[in-house]
Amino acid sequence: MTLAPHRGHQDLRQSLALAAAKGTFPSILLLHGTPGIGKQSLGLWVAQLLLCTAPSSQQGPCGQCQGCHMVLGLEHPDLHWYFPLPRPKGASTPEKLEHALEEARWEALAKRREHPLRVEDGEATEGLYLATARAIRHRASRRPSMAQRQVFIVGRAETLVSQDSSPEAANALLKVLEEPPEGTFFILTARELGRVLSTIRSRSVVVHTPPLLPEEVESFLREDAGMEPDRARNLALLSRGSIGRALAFGMDPDGEGEEGPLTLHRREAYRIVQASVEPSPARGFALALGQATSGGRALADRLVHVEDWLRDLAAVLAGAGHAVADPRARDALDGLAGAHPVHPLAPVLALAAVERARELARGNGNPQLVVSALISELRKHFQSMPAESSTASPAPPLTAGTRP
């Protein structure tokens, strides 16, 4: 199987195609944006563009030549795609670690060929290790095998600095980025630009990759994922412009359907917000104690759902309930807002607290302490900015009939 062609980002792609046609394409391109919006897919499109034998300044890669087909099949010898992986066990020396990581990378690429519409669960601790950076440097020193150029895609470049709080891996890659060999191009991607080493950012052309339009996500889900139109439309609304997010909701990897991991994480996030608006702190204490005592890095990705609920709650409180991401969650949000009225600005101001909690979690903080601190900060915002209301009733829990 081959990967699906990239969707969306038409203006950005046209600008990149024009730069390639003029011979001004940067040696190091850093694409950043929220998870699942297609940054690495766009990186593969760029690889097609640079390895295509008949590219167009308007349309980009031709999509028909051998080079284009080989890129989509992840078979081109001059395309080198690296991404975070779990650290292999039993690799006692740098040489063994490099070999084990390379084997793991090839296995992962084989799985991506077999299952192009993959879903990342975000639970495993992964990184781009010093051994990976050394492997990239070694491969970049070689000449291209088939084309006149070679392209390196390095996904989630911010994880280059995640090993033992040391920038060694990033600095090792930096050495080849300082003076890339002629005809060698690097496409780096990052979810969080601020976590990419500043010296790497300064040597890159940094481009923000925006979320996709809902209709672009819907089109992908219908045409490439084979979903029914109604389901594709609903998931596109919930996606916030992220195909990866829509796929995670709609194609649960464990076969758990509506109760898959992502759905459960979103329910957990609702309970955090619910506990934060209630006058009593009891529910918040119970939620914090119910967390695991380890696994902070996995918690960091789950907390993004708290941000989603806060944004939707702010919309409901401001009288713009039609703007919530998922209309089927409207009843739960209306009930929450009616039971404990707060100022519409409170959820917006509370977003900073979620980002602080995610930063603590990314540092592998204790999830119980992280959630406890988050709820405490959220409560300060909600309790200090009440809104007048003549009635109040208990906020409803999410039920089986409510799509989170």
Image (tube, rainbow, N blue to C red):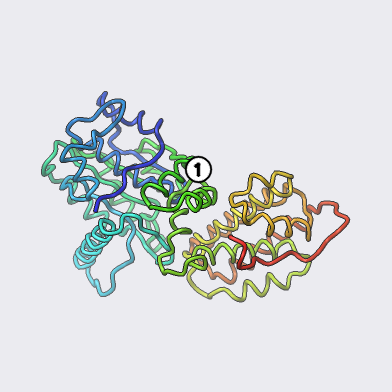
Tell me the amino acid under the disc marked 1.
Answer: Pro
Write the residue at 23% across / 30% down: 55
Q: Position of residue 256 (x, y in %)?
A: 46, 69
Q: Is residue 32 left or right of residue 386?
A: left
Residue found farthest to the top: 22
Q: Compared to 124, does 327 lie above or below?
A: above
Write the residue at 77% across / 49% down: 343
Q: Position of residue 306 (x, y in %)?
A: 60, 58
Query: Which corner quadrant of the image does residue 337 belong to?
Result: bottom right
Residue found farthest to the right: 390
Give the tally of numbered discs: 1
Q: Position of residue 27 (x, y in %)?
A: 27, 36
Quadrant of the image containing the C terminus: bottom right
- From the viewer's side, name the closer residue of 259 and 22: 259
Quadrant of the image containing the N terminus: bottom left
Q: Is residue 259 left or right of residue 196?
A: right
Query: Which corner quadrant of the image does residue 29 belong to?
Result: top left
Q: Compared to 344, does 89 lie above or below?
A: below
Badge 1 marks a residue whose secondary structure is helix
Q: Compared to 384, does 289 lie above or below?
A: below
Write the residue at 70% across / 71% down: 283
Per the image, the residue denoted by label 1 is: 214
Q: Compared to 183, does 296 lie above or below?
A: below
- From the viewer's side, name the closer residue of 122 and 256: 256
Q: Position of residue 316 (x, y in %)?
A: 71, 49
Q: Residues within 10 Å of mark 1 (few under 14, many from 20)?
A: many
Q: Is residue 33 left or right of residue 101?
A: right
